[in-house]
Amino acid sequence: MLSERIGVEGIDWPSALTAHAHLLQTARDALWQRKSDPAEYLGWIDVPEDTESLRQVLRYREAHAWVEDLVVLGIGGSALGAQAVGAALGRGPVRLHFVDNVEPEPILVLLRTLDPRKTLVNVISKSGSTAETMAAFLVFRQWLEQNLADWKKHLVITTDPARGILRSYAQAEGLTTFAIPPSVGGRFSVTCPVGTLSLAFAGIDLEGLLAGARKANEQAKAALEHNLPAQTALIQHLFSQKGKNIVVFMPYSTRLRYLPDWFVQLHDESLGKMHNRAGQEVRTGTTAVRAIGTTDQHAQVQLFREGPRDKLINMVRFLNPSEDLKIPAVRGLEALDYLFGKSFFQLLDAEAKATAHALAKAQQPNYTLTLDKLDAYHLGWLLQHLMWQTAFLGELWNINAFDQPGVELGKEYTYALMGRKGWEALAQELKAEGVG
């Protein structure tokens, strides 16, 4: 549910929702009407309904009971979602390792630590041309082949179902593959095999995760008074018009410590655009910033309260803990008696509410998404809700939220600097500009 604090900065929320009802209804209808067109990259909406892919993932997990370590080779959307969910809910015996950078030292530490006989490597790249992922793949493939006669069973490929370097390579080598739906972009892919394959080994309740995502879909199709992603998108839209160009995403949970990283990519890469759908220069976007409660009450909240009034803070908290810890009384420390007999969850809850109120008193707008508890169902709902929120914002700002043209030039420069065939002219251009 939404906190009452959406009313700060003079916004009358019921009146605002009424005033923008037609705009939101148009956005909702446009998204649902376009979702069957693969070119629109809205396939993430239907992924939670794909029970056959889920069955394939679960069967593969059951057939690989020997795995003790799963190495995920992927970057950005190929890693952040699974990393966030795995850290929040992972309880299985399999350890997840994410290689999402090309810094050599951590990779070498991992290679020296793992037992190849008990390790499965999951290579995730839709195109098969992601330089960071493919560099790691070449190293881990060599490592497996040098140590194991049956190395192929220790390697699984998650890629496009029909195209790309990895698809043809996997077919030639007889490697097991899982498909990334063509109409699903990386930052929207956590509920397809990009995320679910790794999460199955982490012991995540995948059926609960997808059920929660389906609930978010229901809300995204509902009338506006029940359409939570449309409402939170409108909040962000209205405050962006008031100069709040920074969105702080702040869950009150250490278990959700990687969720803001996933959100930052989802929000920034989707909404930071130079041109609108008509090709006009608009330069839209707000900058997402990560924070964790209560940790960042002692790091960032000073800035949030007393710094520039350019932020909208979105907090996430839970009504109930899965487990709790009582705070004992200790003789001689009576100055702390306000804590005696209370629980850690009571303290966490009080800190979240206190921070929201303190921000509001400083005229820093904030709102809270309140979930019953942290489990697979509610986390699946939250992930899909945030994806819908992003899609609605794209419609409100008349931009394509599903491409990332600003990323491509950096990739091309990398290819040129690394000597990739076909990029010689660009390499010469960079050399002339003193790069390289």
Image (tube, rainbow, N blue to C red):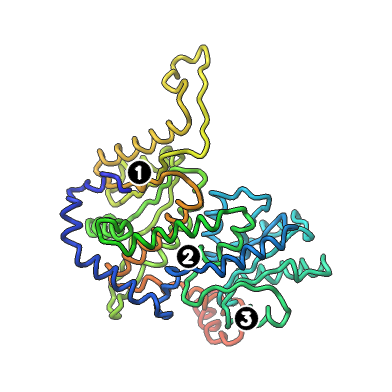
Looking at numbered disc 3 in the image, what kind of residue is underneath it?
Ile
Q: Nearer the viewer, residue 192 or 103?
A: 192
Could you give the CA–CA distance between mark 1 and mark 3, rounded to whole angstroms?
47 Å
Quarter of the image with the C terminus is: bottom right
Instruction: Identify the residue position indicated by label 2 in the image.
Output: 48
Looking at numbered disc 2 in the image, what kind of residue is underneath it?
Pro
Could you give the CA–CA distance between mark 2 and mark 1, rounded to whole angstroms?
39 Å
Looking at numbered disc 1 in the image, what kind of residue is underneath it?
Leu
Instruction: Identify the residue position indicated by label 3 in the image.
Output: 165
Query: Contact, CB < 8 Å: mark 2 with mark 3?
Result: no
Instruction: Give the mark, 1 or 3, whose residue is nearer the N terminus.
Output: 3
The vertical placement of 164 against 347, above or below, is below
Residue 249 shows up from this direction? yes
Q: Residues within 10 Å of mark 3 (few under 14, many from 20)?
A: some
Q: Describe residue 81's horizontal placement relative to residue 36 as left or right.
A: right
Element on which disc 2 rests:
helix
Q: Position of residue 340 (x, y in %)?
A: 46, 20
Element on which disc 1 rests:
helix
Q: Residues within 10 Å of mark 1 (few under 14, many from 20)?
A: few
User: At 75% across and 56% down in the image, what residue appears?
Assistant: 114
Q: Describe residue 353's horizontal placement relative to residue 23 as left or right.
A: right
The vertical placement of 376 against 356, above or below, is below
Q: Position of residue 355 (x, y in %)?
A: 35, 38
Residue 303's mark?
A: 1
Image quadrant in which you'd find residue 337: top left
The vertical placement of 163 against 381, above or below, is below
Element on which disc 3 rests:
helix
User: At 70% across and 72% down in the image, what residue appears?
Assistant: 138
Judge depth for marks 2 and 1 and give the one in front.
2
